[in-house]
C-alpha cells in the first residue's frame, strides 16, 4: 500500500479536510468500497482506491518534492498538433478532440500555502491537494462534477464551451455545438445503462475563475438493471475531456500530445457512506521544487481557430497562475 496525503474542500463549503490514508491499485471500479477516495487517471492506467483515511492537521503533511526537468509546450508544437487534428476532421474521422498543453511556472511557496490560497480565492470549485511518493504532488480547482450519487439518484454535469469573463461577446455556434455534443453523449449513456426518469436542465452560463462555461445538469435514477460502476466506467472520459467519437479521439490525443496527461482530465471521487461525488480533474497542476506544471486544454472542432484556442488555454491558466504569482 502507498501512503497518501490528501486535502480537499468541497464546493461552497468553508472547511477543508486534511487526511492521511493508504492507496492500492484496483483493476475495476466495482472494487470501490463504501467510504474512501478514488483517484483515476485519464488513460485508466491508474485506478487507486484510498482507504483508512484519518483526520490530521496541515503540519502533518510530509512533502518530499523532487527536482523535475519540466518545460512548457512550445507554441509551434501546439500548432502542429492542432493541424494534425484538423486533418482528422477533414478525413471525417472525428468531430471533436480536446487538445492540451503544459505551462511551467516558477513558485517558491509550499504546497500547503498554495492550497490555502486556492481556498481563499475560489469558493465554488472542488479544491484538492494530493501527495504520495509514487504520484508526486498535485493540486487543482475544478468546476466540473462528473457524476454525483445519493442513494439511487444521479446528477451529472455536462460542461463545455469556454470564453473569458466580461469579454463582452456572446456564445458562438462552435461553443454551443461543443456543449450539445457532451449533453447528447451523456443522455445516450444513461439510456444505454437503463437509467430512469432522465431529465436535462440547461444550458446556462457559469463562471469558473477567469472563464465562463456552458453547463447543463442531467438528473436520472438508477434502474433495477443499472450497474453504477459500469456506468461510471462508461462515462469516463466524456467528450468534454476527450472528444467524439471518444475511442478515436483518445488514440489521436496519445499521438499528437507530447506529454502524458496522468491525472489531468481523470477524476477524483469522494465516497461517503450516503453520497458519492466524482470530480473531473481540470484546472490542475503538478508541483516540484521551485516550479509548477499546469495542464491546460480546450475543445477543438472543425470550426476552431488555432490562435483563439491557444488564447483560451491562456485564460484557463489564470485560475492557477493567480495563486502562484501572488
Image: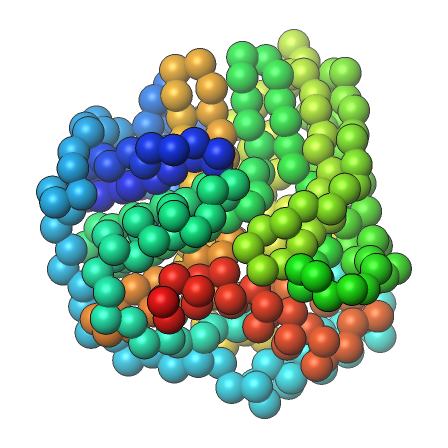
Give the left or right position of residue 221, taking residue 104 as reference: right
Residue sitting at x 69%, y 52%? 213
Q: Quadrant of residue 172?
A: bottom right
Q: Residue at coordinates 39% horizontally, 21% vertically from top-left?
A: 272
Q: Residue 3 location in percent, x, y?
A: 17, 42
User: In x, y percent, where is residue 14?
Assistant: 38, 33
Up-down: is 145 above or below 154? Answer: below
The answer to whether residue 266 is left or right of residue 200 is: left
Foreground of the two, 23 or 172: 172
In the rendering, at what x and y percent does residue 126 appear?
Answer: 46, 41
Question: Is residue 99 positioned above or below 235 on the image?
Answer: below
In the picture shown, does residue 109 fall above or below 191?
below
From this viewpoint, is residue 192 visible? no
Q: Position of residue 257 (x, y in %)?
A: 54, 73
161 shown above or below 199: below
Work out which quarter of the rendered image holds the N terminus and state it: top left
For the C terminus, the image quarter is bottom left
> What scheme was used to colour the molecule?
rainbow
How many marks the image carries: the answer is: 0
Tell me what residue is drawn at x 29 percent, y 41 percent: 7
Q: Does residue 317 show up? A: yes
Query: Seen from this angle, which residue lies furthest right?
Result: 173
Tell which residue pokes out farthest to the bottom in this image: 76
Residue found at the very far top of the displayed protein: 224
Q: Quadrant of residue 298?
A: bottom right
Q: Is residue 58 left or right of residue 219?
A: left
Residue at 49 percent across and 57 percent down: it is 283
Out of 17 and 89, give the one closest to the viewer.
Answer: 17
Amino acid at each position: 500500500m502507498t501512503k497518501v496525503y490528501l486535502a480537499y474542500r468541497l464546493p461552497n463549503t468553508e472547511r477543508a479536510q486534511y487526511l492521511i490514508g493508504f492507496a492500492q491499485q484496483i483493476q475495476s471500479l466495482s472494487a470501490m468500497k463504501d467510504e474512501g477516495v478514488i483517484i483515476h487517471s485519464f488513460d485508466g492506467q491508474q485506478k487507486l482506491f484510498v482507504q483508512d483515511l484519518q483526520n490530521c492537521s496541515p503540519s502533518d503533511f510530509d512533502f518530499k518534492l523532487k527536482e523535475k526537468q519540466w518545460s512548457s509546450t512550445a507554441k509551434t508544437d501546439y500548432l502542429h498538433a492542432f493541424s494534425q487534428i484538423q486533418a482528422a476532421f477533414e478525413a471525417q474521422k472525428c468531430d471533436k478532440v480536446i487538445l492540451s498543453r503544459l505551462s511551467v511556472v516558477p513558485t517558491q511557496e509550499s504546497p500547503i500555502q498554495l492550497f490555502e490560497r486556492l481556498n481563499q480565492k475560489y469558493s465554488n470549485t472542488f479544491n484538492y491537494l494530493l501527495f504520495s511518493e509514487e504520484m508526486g504532488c498535485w493540486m487543482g480547482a475544478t468546476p466540473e462534477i462528473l457524476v454525483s450519487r445519493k442513494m439511487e439518484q444521479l446528477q451529472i454535469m455536462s460542461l463545455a464551451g469556454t470564453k473569458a469573463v466580461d469579454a463582452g461577446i456572446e456564445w458562438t455556434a462552435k461553443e454551443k455545438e461543443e456543449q450539445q455534443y457532451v449533453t447528447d453523449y451523456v443522455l445516450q449513456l444513461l439510456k444505454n445503462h437503463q437509467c430512469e426518469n432522465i431529465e436535462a436542465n440547461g444550458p446556462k452560463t457559469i463562471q469558473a475563475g477567469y472563464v465562463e462555461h456552458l453547463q447543463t445538469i442531467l438528473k436520472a435514477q438508477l434502474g433495477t438493471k443499472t450497474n453504477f460502476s459500469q456506468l461510471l466506467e462508461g462515462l469516463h472520459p466524456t467528450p468534454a475531456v476527450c472528444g467524439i467519437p471518444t475511442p478515436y479521439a483518445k488514440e489521436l490525443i496519445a499521438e499528437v500530445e507530447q506529454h502524458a496527461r496522468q491525472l489531468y482530465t481523470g477524476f477524483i471521487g469522494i465516497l461517503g457512506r450516503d453520497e458519492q461525488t466524482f470530480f473531473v480533474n481540470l484546472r490542475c497542476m503538478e508541483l516540484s521544487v521551485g516550479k509548477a506544471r499546469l495542464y491546460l486544454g480546450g475543445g477543438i472542432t472543425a470550426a476552431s481557430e488555432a490562435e483563439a484556442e491557444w488564447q483560451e488555454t491562456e485564460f484557463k491558466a489564470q485560475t492557477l497562475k493567480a495563486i502562484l504569482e501572488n
